[in-house]
Amino acid sequence: MPPPVWLMRQAGRYLPEYREIRSHAGTFLDLCYAPDLAIEATLQPVRRFSLDAAIVFSDILLVPHALGQEVSFSEGKGPKLAALKQSGDLKGLVLEDVATKLRPVYEAIKQLHRELAPEIALIGFAGAPWTLAAYMIEGKTSRHFSKAQNWAKAEPQSFSKLIDVLVEAVSGHLIRQVEAGADVVQIFDSWAGVLSPEAFERWVVQPTRAIVGKVKEAVPGTPVIGFPRGVDVLYKDYAEASGVDGVSIDTQVSPAWAAAELQDKVCVQGNLDPEALVEGGKRMRDATAQILEALGSGPFVFNLGHGVVPQTPPEHVSELLETIRGAV
Ligand code: CP3
């Protein structure tokens, strides 16, 4: 049996039909908060390709936005946030408003749950507290997120308060997505890889464990996938200690290592290089075969090691799916 397959960022700018709705939607946030458009963006890749899952079209930065932080996206420059500068700024974050402000996401999920064929899994998601805190303090994307790292080191007590607020906001957001009809949730910790092992344990593993505990308490049996991108051998600690059921691995992890060290603990998801999908052809087929060879006999979900990039030719996604399903 071929493994189930979906792709991180399977909706987005590489699809002409996405660029079409994006051009009428106003800002990127307007698109995320309009259930009809978010539903359409979610369904576009599912209609075009025979994927095994749909991931609700949204963004991890909706949670900081719903907490009251200013967030905007400018074309080609990525996200911009009104950076938190000192502990006093945490007072501006209002947990009580999050559920109401994110209602359009739950509305989209409810309708998607009704519309999607039952064999297609519906995935909800959120950013992990560390990655969200990193954007909230830095105000934009960054190579090392040193402002956030320095805050965590210099003032662990106030940083911990921020993480606690995010644990509450994120677990509530995930629980409401599952209640609305999501079958699985994924926690994106895209910047886990910049932390020291000690900081990783405190700001990634512990908060993730708290979130997983809350989700499973509220909706028992919900599968949770974690993606602590870039953490190398610490993936093993994460698989052992965070409580997640599945771990998404990035392109730096060798599939054979993941098979030996992770697959007896969790379902592994990954990890084709998005650049191999851009290139297509032999490079893509060889890399896919290698991943299937190493991971295909254990609990496994085929995915990329990071999101689909805008330069990806859509035909290469069809070719990838044929390769995966023809190989087994
Ligand atoms: O996977 C899917 O199809 C669902 C959609 C999805 C988006 N963002 C849509 C999006 C998901 C799962 C995300 C997660 C996300 N957002 C992450 C975690 C995964 C990762 O990439 O590490 C992060 C760090 C963000 C924050 C974010 N949002 C950034 C850094 C950017 C700008 C970079 C870029 O590609 O433009 C965004 C914008 C964004 N989120 C776009 C999309 C389709 C592009 C904006 C547009 O279409 O104008």
Image (cartoon, rainbow, N blue to C red):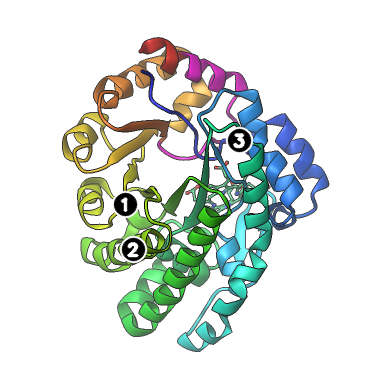
Considering every residue shown, the one lying at the far bottom of the view is 88
Q: What stretch is highlighted in magenta?
A: 305-322
Amino acid at the residue labelled 1 = Val
Q: Identify the residue position indicated by label 2 in the image.
A: 213
Q: Distance between the residues labelled 1 and 2?
A: 9 Å
* Foreground residue among 290 and 241: 241
Q: Can residue 76 be seen in this view?
A: no
Q: Where is residue 166 in the image (x, y as percent from the top left)?
A: 46, 71
Q: Position of residue 164 (x, y in %)?
A: 40, 76
* Foreground residue among 220 and 325: 220
Q: Identify the residue position indicated by label 1 in the image.
A: 244
What is the secondary structure assignment of the residue under circle 3? Answer: loop
Q: Identify the residue position indicated by label 3 in the image.
A: 310
What is the secondary structure assignment of the residue under circle 2? Answer: helix
Give the foreground label among 1 and 2.
2
Give the foreground label among 3 and 1.
1
